Image (tube, rainbow, N blue to C red):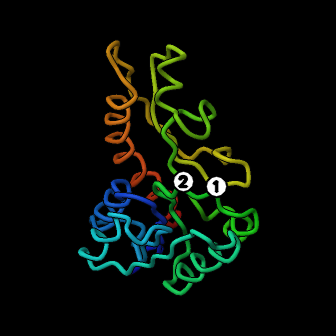
């Protein structure tokens, strides 16, 4: 599409956020276009969906590979596809400081908590254990410190009295699918 920013998405699983980004990127007025979906797991379900939607894919297992070598291969695929932004969408690998530095200000991630609360894993259980009334999701720029980059957008989700980590995760995921495309679109769109 003319006047859109090319984006590569990195995934490790089923790709629900990836799908939300793909479909939103096809809507009239979208500021970005998905040019690649790449994964560290060749069996990731999201790769099948991306391929069915006509999006080029790249997969390379990280198992037994040096982190820097794997990062370089993932980055080369993104660069070869013409990506100017990388969107991490359930990519379950910590990227090297060197990789993050090369994409400084051009790599986004979605995290299932209202950062700065609950960086890392088990965010839903931690929110429930703390008795929080709100959970949610955050889209942020990736920095060398885990889940600590500049916050670009957040959405709150009410915690219900009978919530389990799974029921809360299911609702937060729906909210993520609204938040991530909107934030990426705003980020990728050139200023008027």
In the displayed structure image, the side of residue 108 where residue 177 appears, left or right: left
Please report the residue visible at 50 percent of the width from the left and 49 percent of the height from the top: 110
Q: Can you give x and y, in whole percent of width and height, for residue 35 in the image?
A: 42, 77
Please report the residue visible at 36 percent of the width from the left and 23 percent of the height from the top: 164
| Pointers 1 and 2 in contact (C-beta within 8 Å) | yes
Q: Residue furthest left?
A: 52
Tell me the residue that label 1 is attached to.
142
Q: Residue furthest front?
A: 64
Residue 109 image label? 2
Q: Can you give x and y, in whole percent of width and height, for residue 144 in the image?
A: 73, 55
Instruction: State which tag comes first along the sequence, 1 or 2.
Output: 2
Give SS at disc 2.
strand
Q: Quadrant of residue 24?
A: bottom left
Q: Nearer the viewer, residue 139 or 125?
A: 125
Q: Nearer the viewer, residue 118 or 33?
A: 118
Please report the residue visible at 39 percent of the width from the left and 55 percent of the height from the top: 181
Whether 101 is drawn above or below 118: the answer is: below
């Amino acid at each position: 599409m003319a006047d859109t920013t090319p984006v590569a998405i990195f995934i490790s699983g089923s790709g629900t956020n990836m799908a939300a980004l793909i479909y939103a990127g096809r809507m009239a007025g979208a500021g970005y276009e998905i040019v690649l979906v790449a994964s560290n797991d060749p069996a990731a379900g999201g790769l099948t969906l991306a391929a069915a939607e006509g999006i080029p894919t790249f997969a390379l297992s990280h198992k037994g590979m040096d982190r820097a070598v794997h990062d370089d291969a993932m980055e080369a695929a993104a660069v070869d596809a013409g990506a100017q932004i990388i969107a991490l969408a359930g990519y379950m690998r910590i990227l090297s400081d060197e990789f993050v530095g090369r994409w400084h200000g051009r790599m986004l991630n979605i995290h299932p908590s209202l950062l700065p609360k609950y960086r890392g894993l088990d965010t839903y259980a931690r929110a429930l254990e703390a008795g929080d009334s709100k959970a949610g999701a955050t889209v942020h720029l990736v920095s060398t410190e885990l889940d600590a980059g500049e916050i670009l957008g957040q959405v709150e989700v009410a915690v219900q009295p009978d919530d389990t980590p799974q029921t809360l995760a299911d609702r937060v995921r729906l909210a993520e699918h609204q938040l991530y495309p909107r934030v990426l679109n705003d980020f990728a769109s050139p200023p008027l």
